[in-house]
Amino acid sequence: MGRQFDALIVGSGQAGPFLASRLASAGKTVALVERKVLGGTCVNTGCTPTKTMVASAKVAQMAREAARFGVHLGGDVRVSLAEVKSRADKVVQGSRDSLRKMLDNAKATVVYGQARFVSSHEVQVGGEILSGQQIFINVGGRAAAPKLPGLQSVRYLTNSSLLELTELPRHLVVVGGGAVGVEFAQMFRRFGSEVTLVEMKPRLMHRDDLAASELLADLFSQEGIGLRLDSECISFSELPDGVCVHVDCKAGDPEVHGSHVLLAMGRVPNTDDLGLEAAGVRRDAAGFISVDDQLCTNVPHIWALGDCNRRGAFTHTAYNDFEIVASNLLDGGNRRVTDRIAAWATYTVPPLAQVGMTEEEARATGKELLIATLPMRSVSRAIEKGETFGFMKVVVDAKTSRILGATIFGVGGDEAIHSILDIMYADRPYTTLRDAVHIHPTVAELIPTLLGSLQPASK
């Protein structure tokens, strides 16, 4: 018969452990099944290790530029990737341990192994059948490996396997100009590797603000990162000492020879080995689990949270999925995915943060707009820190005075932008924030000034 629980949670990404703890604290019997290690992508191969490594890369760059601040260091800056990795590994392990402690304190049962549905209420883990009155799927995703010519004949890295390197690549070729690609490209360039970034589209970060994307390309060129954009027909072949990436660009050498290749071309959900057909759970053509606005699948007692449901691709949206489900099931709430405002940040240095619509998206609505842009060199705090690269931009609906979106590409932008996001959630006019008094000296203090400089958008 196997063990029976009130709730089964399959996967321990950002939503799963917190939901397990909350349900267990509400008096339910809960089992969480994890195939490998607690924490999912964010803790193990995403935010936690990569942002720890970004911090190391920033220190390396600051050491090279120390003389600008009147600080003179002797000798060349040398980065030990093994030591960088060791530091990141310790931070990751700390996060895993914290999750396990939370689950143990909540008296949730943790089961390790691959889960596979055998019915709509049962999953098999090893030789055991676990059953649950309610089931929550939180299995996340992994790096996509598109069917590009020659890819299967070469050795390539993903965001996961790259983190296992202990020696710096001589020449890292990054294929993909989204968030993962640009973060690793800058990071390894600052560590000391030669880096070339290859992107099929005409620009980096094509879902972000156009001006920010173009400025990021300028920054990368300044830092010595080779850019091969508009690469229409990417293919791969093996070299005696690495990999050849055939880029077929309109200009420049048609081949890039690297010692290592990182594939950063999107994500696919980890749903192909769950046996979802046995549970009757529907997926879309790309494998993502179909859910409604309250994250329920077509099977009424099964929910899908996090990256596997295509309703968000970030740690913060996965955590919000947990909040939505917990509130609706335990607190009598009526929260929905569509209540949240799109917001994300890419952790280059400086960070690129976006909330709501980009300028291009806002213009496409046909609304009458107010737009303001200020360079980061207008921000006293940025000047004092010696980090004046970038800009702030805000877009407002002229008729309703509501902020439609904002971009901050600059030091502290990933934190400062939350004051704009909070006003948007409060559904207050931009004048509320414009008239606020912010602390000096901070990056956020320029946001009221930014809003005070709004002008009608040119047609």
Image (cartoon, rainbow, N blue to C red):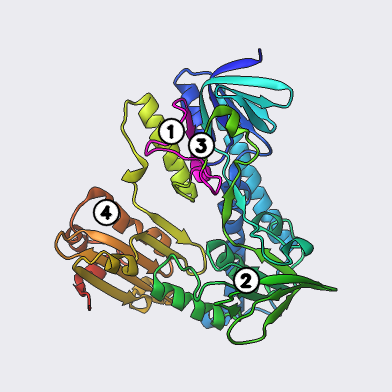
Q: In this view, does 235 lie above or below 293?
A: below
In the foreground, 316 or 174: 174
Query: Mark 1 or 2, which is nearer the eye?
Result: 1
Q: Residue furthest toward the left?
A: 399
- Residue 16 lies left or right of residue 458; in this view the side is right
Numbered mark located on residue 424 in the image = 4
Q: Between residues 424 and 94, which one lies in front from this camera angle?
A: 424
Closest to the camera, between mark 4 and mark 3, is 3
Badge number at residue 296: 1
Q: Nearer the viewer, residue 150 or 163?
A: 150
SS at badge 2 = helix
Query: x, y percentage for residue 261?
Result: 70, 67
Highlighted range, magenta: 284-309
Q: Which amino acid does label 3 sit on?
A: Arg
Q: How crowded is mark 4: few (under 14 residues within 10 Å), some or many (20 or more)?
A: some
Q: Do the residues labelled 1 and 2 touch (CB within 8 Å)?
A: no
Mark 4 or mark 3: whose residue is earlier in sequence: 3
State the mark number for residue 282.
3
**Amino acid type of the residue tagged 2 in the rendering:** Ala
Relative to 218, is 431 above or below? above
Q: Measure the alpha-carbon separation of dots 1 and 4.
A: 27 Å
- Front-lying residue, 277 or 294: 277
Note whether 300 is above or below 84 in the view shown: above
Q: Nearer the viewer, mark 2 or mark 4?
A: 4
Answer with mark 1 or mark 4, whichever residue precedes in sequence: 1
Location of mark 2 (residue) = 60
Q: Which mark is residue 140?
A: none
The reply to whether callout 2 and callout 4 are in contact (CB within 8 Å) is: no
